[in-house]
Image: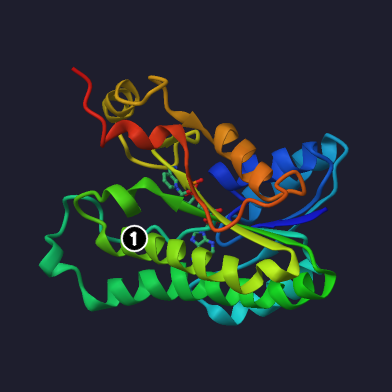
Amino acid sequence: MHALVTGGSSGIGAATALAYARAGARVTITYNTGTDRAAEVVARIEEEGGEAAAVHLDLEDHATVAPAVAAAGPVDALVANAVRWGTVMPGSVAFEDVPAAEWSAALHANVVGNALLIQAVLPEMRRRRFGRIVLVSSGAAEEGQPGPGPYGTAKMALHGLARALAWEAGGDGILVNVAVAGLTVTGGRHPIPQHVFDEVASRTPTRRLSTADDLAALIVFLGSADNRNLTGEIIRDGSNAGRSVHIG
Ligand SMILES: NC(=O)c1ccc[n+]([C@@H]2O[C@H](COP(=O)([O-])OP(=O)(O)OC[C@H]3O[C@@H](n4cnc5c(N)ncnc54)[C@H](OP(=O)(O)O)[C@@H]3O)[C@@H](O)[C@H]2O)c1
C-alpha cells in the first residue's frame, strides 16, 4: 500500500501519515510552506522503521499538482487533507463584504485543486483496478458557521465531488469517501481559545473532542483495503455533534 497524504506536514495530515506507516503502508506526504515540518514527519516515520517521502504541493498553484503526483509515483490511496484555510476569519467580515477574490481563491484551491489532484492519480488506480480516495471535510460545511463562507462552501463541494466520483470510479475498484472532522485537537496552529474547545466538547455525545489521531484512524480505515465496499459516504466524526445537539 502506497498512500499519498496531502497536507501531511501538520495536524491531521501528519497524524494520518504516521498511522498509515504504522499500518505498514509506504507514505508520501505533501507540504506547502512547511518544508521543515514535513522533514520531521518523514524522519519520525523512518525512525519507527517505516518508509516515507515528502513532495511539494500548492493547491493554489495548479502547476504543482502533476509534478507532485509524478514524484510520488503510483498510489493506492489518496487522502485529500490539505486545505487553504482562507483569509476571512469568523466574525471579521460580513458575508456581503467577502471579496470576490476570496471566493475564487477558496474554490480554486480547495475544489479545483483537489479535483485536479484526483484526476492525476485516477488513471493509474483504474489501470490497477484498486484505489481508495478520502476527502477531508469539515462540520462547517454542513452545519454552517458565521464567517468563513468560502471555506464551508468549498468543503461542501467536495461532498458532491465524492458522491459523483464514487459512481464514476466504483466499477474500477475505486472507493471514495468523505471524512468530516469537527473541531479537532491537533496541537494548536490556530487561534481558537480553550473555552471554545471546552464548550463544543461538552455538547458532543462522548463529551470530548477528537484528536488528530482519532481522525487518522478513521481516514486510514476508509483509505485502506480493510474498507471493502464503503463508498460515496459522508462519515461524520464525533466532534461534529457539538453545535447541532442541545442537551438540557
Ligand atoms: N483542525 C480542525 O479542527 C478541523 C476541523 C474541521 C476540518 N478540518 C480539516 O482537516 C484538514 C486538516 O486540518 P488541520 O487542522 O490538520 O490543518 P493544519 O494543521 O492547518 O494543516 C494544513 C495542511 O495543509 C497544507 N496547506 C495549506 N495551504 C496549502 C495549499 N495552498 N496547498 C497545499 N497544501 C496546503 C499545510 O501545509 P504547510 O503547513 O506545509 O504549509 C498543512 O500541511 C483540513 O482539510 C481541514 O479543513 C480540521
Q: Quadrant of the C terminus?
A: top left
- The picture places residue 133, in percent across and down from the top left corner, at 64, 59
- Residue 227 lies left or right of residue 191; in this view the side is right
Question: What kind of residue is marked 1?
Answer: Tyr
- Residue 124 lies left or right of residue 189; in this view the side is right
Farthest residue, direction top: 248
Farthest residue, direction bottom: 63
- The picture places residue 210, in percent across and down from the top left corner, at 48, 30
- Residue 142 in the image: above or below residue 207: below
> Circle 1 is placed at which residue position?
151
Q: Is residue 182 visible?
A: yes
Res 71 quadrant in image: bottom right
Name the secondary structure under disc 1. Answer: helix
- Residue 188 lies left or right of residue 151; in this view the side is right
Ligand 1: does it lie within 8 Å of the C-beta at label 1?
Answer: yes
The residue lying at 85 percent from left, 48 percent from top is 51
Res 202 quadrant in image: top left
